Image: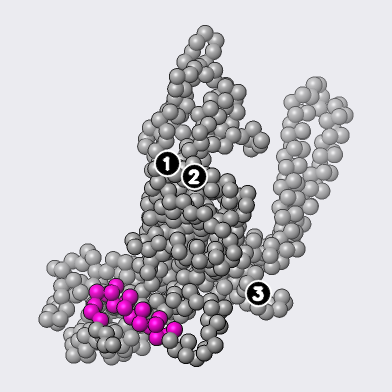
Amino acid sequence: MEESQLHIVDLKSKDMLRKIENGIVYGLPVLLQDVLEELDPALEPVLAKALIKVGNREVLRLGDKELDYNKDFKLYITTKLANPHYTPEVSTKTTIINFAVKQQGLEAQLLGIVVQKEQPTLERQKADLTLRVAAGKQKLVDLEDEILRLLSEAEGSLLENETLVDTLQQSKLTSDEVTRQLNEAEETEIKIDAKREEFRPAAIRSSIAYFVLDDMGRVDPMYQFSLDAYVDLFNQSMDKSRTSPKNITGTERCRQINVAHTLSVYQYTCRGLFERDKLLFALQLCLRIMTSENKVPKQEFDFLCYGGAGIERADQRPNPCPEWIDAGAWDNITALDSIPACMGIASAFEQGQRDWRAWFTSSEPEETPLPGDWENKVTEMQRICIIRALRLDRVLFCASRFVRLNLGPQFADPPPFDLRAIFQSSNHRTPLIFVLSPGVDPTAQVKSLANDLSTNVDICALGQGQAPVAMSLMNLGLRSGSWVFLANCHLMLSWMPHCDFRLWLSASPSPKFPIAILQRGIKMTTEPPRGLRANMLKLYNLVGEEQFGRCQQRLKYQRLLFSLCWFHALLHTSSMNRTIVSVMI
């Protein structure tokens, strides 16, 4: 809209005020991008349009300067915050427009990407038809405007005005021709749209997955994902998913894309999540997908979230087993009994107390068959609700089982951390960000990978006075192609640059970390693995094929390596669980 005259600045630009001053004086548009909820107080006169009349001049006082105000000046402000809350003072002085992507709009965008890749001819026809229809409608409007202009300028008798009569006749012929072309184009467009609809399931699934990612930002401010990176991931998933010949049906192709992309999203996201949030993400992804397929009733989902909150105990039936079902659990059972699919479960406790108690006291109730005919009549979602009502301590295990049965076992077991694979998925415009955990330092892993790839890595621990050093290293890295690792970025949040090249960063979680860098970068958590299997997988990933093949006595080396990894994993798991391990030597 503003084309090449637009000046782009942000709050960290040294010349921000100078560019705004030039825009005010010369009437140029200025874009202030990536602002937070608090704006620079120096912008107050600009937002308030605090103009002073000095003779025939309109003057705006900005700081200690009086600037001649040009009415062509425009100030645009953008933010990457998902749901910003600005003060009434800011809201009343600006026009706020919500440009956030919606699921329906993203679905249409992704549908176009799928069709463009799978049926490029069809998508070109769709684009051409859209332009032709728009041009035809505009031509009809122009004809009407021309006729109205001639009528308004006509003098004397309209019938004697030959120019007007000829124009009217020509307009009628043109209008009939344009209308005919529009009807043909719209009929063709309907046929094309019907063909494009075959690929809509892939667009629906991928748009759902994006908004699950977007919601993770509410769990931790470090979980930020950009739409551009997501679209790139979607294109990669489509390329990897093609395992059959091209002449397959649209339905089968959508199934391939959905399977591959859902797994890619899970693996891509898990490497940037803390261990405590990985199951939450998998469960949310599973529930959103099943909800879109009408497989999760709203009442059951609400019960999973809120349980028996708000139950009126005055109208509640008596608890038949108060010795092992407490008041809160009976509230949950009462609320569950109001759900149509679970109606009668409260009376089942009165009739089969012994069976229900045996199930209740089992070590793994999520794997133990439910008493009576309830095992055959409930769905997996209803099983989670029953576990949530009585055994809150086993909800996470039941959620993992739910995800495993509905999405697949690979979604219930987070992928092991593989720094080399993460590096290979990056490019020179993608910063790699380590989200630090207490007691974990990824520096040794970065050095080891750089050594394996014969690459030089320069390391700078940020802190007071380190900004010039970091800038020098980044400029050197840009020229020589070496790596730069900036550690402890959370200590210099006010200095953080907007990096658009390959860069290694590490920072502790912080709500003030620049969203632009988080969205653009590949995030990795550095938490210690949990469980024997995860610990052993991490240790085995540290041993490459070349190192593994160096030993001539391969069988003995395998056994020794397994024993060492098992012993280390056992000690590590036990120390995390605060248990005592007795070792006999």
Mark 3 sits on what residue?
Answer: 242
Q: CA distance from mark 1 to mark 2?
A: 8 Å
Is residue 139 located in the magenta-colored stretch of the structure? Answer: no
Residue 257, position as x, y percentages in the image: 60, 72
Quadrant the C terminus occupies: bottom left
- Give me the residue at 33% from left, 61% from top: 438
Magenta residues? Answer: 561-581
Q: Residues within 10 Å of mark 2 (few under 14, many from 20)?
A: few
Mark 1 sits on what residue?
Answer: 465
Using the image as rendered, state which of residue 201 and residue 190 is in the foreground. Answer: 201
Q: Marks 1 and 2: CB-CB under 8 Å?
A: yes
The kind of secondary structure the magenta stretch mainly shows is helix
Mark 2 sits on what residue?
Answer: 469
Please tell me in which quadrant of the rendered image residue 114 appears.
Answer: bottom right
Q: How is the image coloured?
A: one colour
Is residue 564 located in the magenta-colored stretch of the structure? Answer: yes
Using the image as rendered, state which of residue 346 and residue 536 is in the foreground. Answer: 536
Nearer-N-terminus badge (3/2): 3
Residue at disc 2, secondary structure: helix
**Badge 1 amino acid:** Gly
**Badge 2 amino acid:** Val
Q: From the viewer's perspective, tell me whether residue 357 is left or right of residue 212.
A: left
